[in-house]
């Protein structure tokens, strides 16, 4: 059964998950914004989060003048797979860490191996 949660409460949970990321790691993030959307792109209905941009490990000397990378956390699919608010808190935390890891160049295979899939 899906959890019923307002967008503002969900945004608070995303902010809390970001607050839990170690300060040293957050300080290394560069030119990235974190957003909350209700629904993922068409055809990606089960997607909980998405990283779009140029991972830090892929940026070279010519990286300049680009728009910020985007980390998007999707409310609808997250609420659909959770039974309780506690489940949402945990899933949001995992999704935020997962997408931040992509910003640092860590791929899905490695994240799954580390238990952050």
Image (cartoon, rainbow, N blue to C red):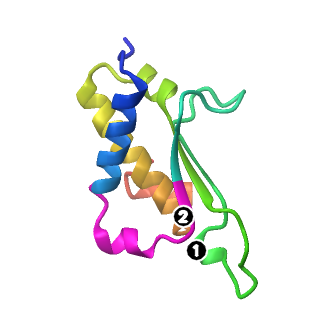
On screen, residue 88 versus residue 34, left or right, reads left
* Circle 2: element type: helix
The image quarter containing residue 66 is bottom right
- Percent x, y for residue 51? 59, 52
Upstream in sequence: badge 2 or badge 1? 1
Q: Name the secondary structure under disc 1.
A: helix
Q: Residue furthest bottom?
A: 61
Disc sitting over residue 103 in the figure: 2
Res. 56 mark:
1
Within 10 Å of the Cα at label 2, are there few (<14), some (14-19), or many (20+) other Cα atoms? many
Marks 2 and 1 close (CB-CB < 8 Å): yes
Residue 2 in picture, x, y percent from top left? 39, 15
Q: Residue at x 37, y 11 (%)?
A: 1
Question: Which range of residues does the magenta coloring cover?
Answer: 20-33
Left or right relative to 26: residue 32? right
In terms of depth relative to the viewer, which is nearer, 110 or 87? 87
108 and 73: which is toward the camera: 73
Locate residue 96, reporting x and y percent: 42, 49
The residue furthest top is 1
């Amino acid at each position: 059964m899906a959890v019923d949660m307002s967008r503002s409460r969900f945004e608070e949970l995303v902010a809390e998950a970001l607050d839990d990321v170690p300060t040293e790691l957050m300080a290394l993030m560069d030119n990235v914004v974190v957003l909350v959307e209700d629904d993922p792109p068409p055809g990606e209905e089960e997607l909980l989060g998405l990283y779009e941009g140029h991972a830090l490990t892929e940026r070279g000397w010519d990286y300049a003048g680009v728009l910020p990378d985007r980390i998007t956390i999707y409310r609808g699919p997250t609420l659909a797979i959770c039974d309780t608010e506690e489940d949402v808190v945990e899933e949001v935390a995992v999704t935020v860490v997962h997408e931040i890891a992509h910003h640092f160049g860590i791929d899905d295979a490695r994240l799954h191996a580390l238990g952050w899939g």
